[in-house]
Structure formats: C-alpha cells, structure tokens
Amino acid sequence: VQLQASGGGLVQAGGSLRLSCAASGGIFSRYAMAWFRQGPGKEREFVAVIHRNGERMYLDDVKGRFTVSRDNDKKMVFLQMNNLKPEDTAAYYCAGRSVILTDTNNLADASWYTYWGQGTQVTVSS
C-alpha cells in the first residue's frame, strides 16, 4: 500500500486548507486512516483519525477547526483545516492500517500504523 499526501501550502492565519491522501493497493475500506503532524523541533503528534466504521477522533487543539473525512470509492482521506493558526505550521502525514470494526485502540499512536505517506508542508503566517 502506498499513500500520497498533497494539498499543503502557505496560508495566512484564519485561512483554510484541504489536505488529501490517496491510497493505492490494499482494501482501503478496511483501514483506519489518520493524520499526524510534525512541527519544527517537535515530535510527531496525532491530529485526527477516521476509523473504517466512520468514527472520528481529534487532537483537542484542532477540534471544531479540522474535519477528517474519507471516500472509500476513491481510496482517499481528507483533512479540511479551517481557522488555521501559526501553531498549526508543520509537515502533515497521512497514515493507515487495516483494522477490525470493533478495534478502536491505539488510533492516536503513530507506532501502530503500518503505512505512511510522505509529508505535505503546511505553513501558517501570522
């Protein structure tokens, strides 16, 4: 399985961006798909996940501003980011792993994911 992230860019504070992640290979509908980010000098952190069962989970700092969604037919996952702040500046990575419907453990744990896309840079200016 290969993941390809795109959609990053430079935006002013308060602006919006939509990140996309396209998957190739595998059975996408069976995956939990997540977004992580890594800012300058920071560790990689969980941002959002959408389970194969449709459940979503978010980092507290992005709740109400970011929305994760998926299109299983197109094998894509999206991250709509609104009201961006300078502290959202980071490289954003999509990640995926096959999961059973009832397994909702470890979804925020980067080490749990099997597949990773390359990062797409998001820079928010003040």
Image (cartoon, rainbow, N blue to C red):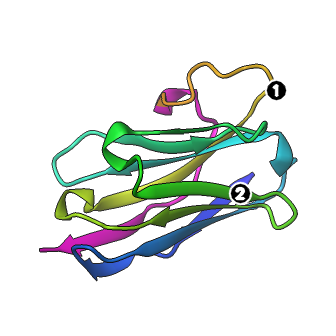
Above/below status of 68 relative to 114: below
**At 74% from the left edge and 41% from the top edge, which residue is drawn?**
54
Q: Position of residue 64 (x, y in %)?
A: 41, 52
Q: Is residue 114 above or below residue 22?
A: above
Residue bounds of the magenta highlight: 110-126
Q: Say which mark, if any, is on residue 21.
A: none
Which label number is shown at residue 70?
2
Please say whether residue 114 is one of the residues in the magenta stretch.
yes
Circle 2: residue type: Arg
Q: Position of residue 119 (x, y in %)?
A: 44, 61
From the viewer's perspective, tell me whether residue 110 is left or right of residue 69.
left
Residue pictured at 48% horizontal, 33% vertical: 110
Q: Is 4 one of the magenta-colored residues? A: no
- Residue indicated by mark 1: 101
Q: Of helix, strand and loop, which one carries label 1?
A: loop
> Which residue: 48% across, 27% down?
109
The percent position of residue 81, horizontal first and vertical second, equals 43, 65
Residue 98 place in picture, x, y as percent = 76, 34
What amino acid is labelled 1 in the image?
A: Leu
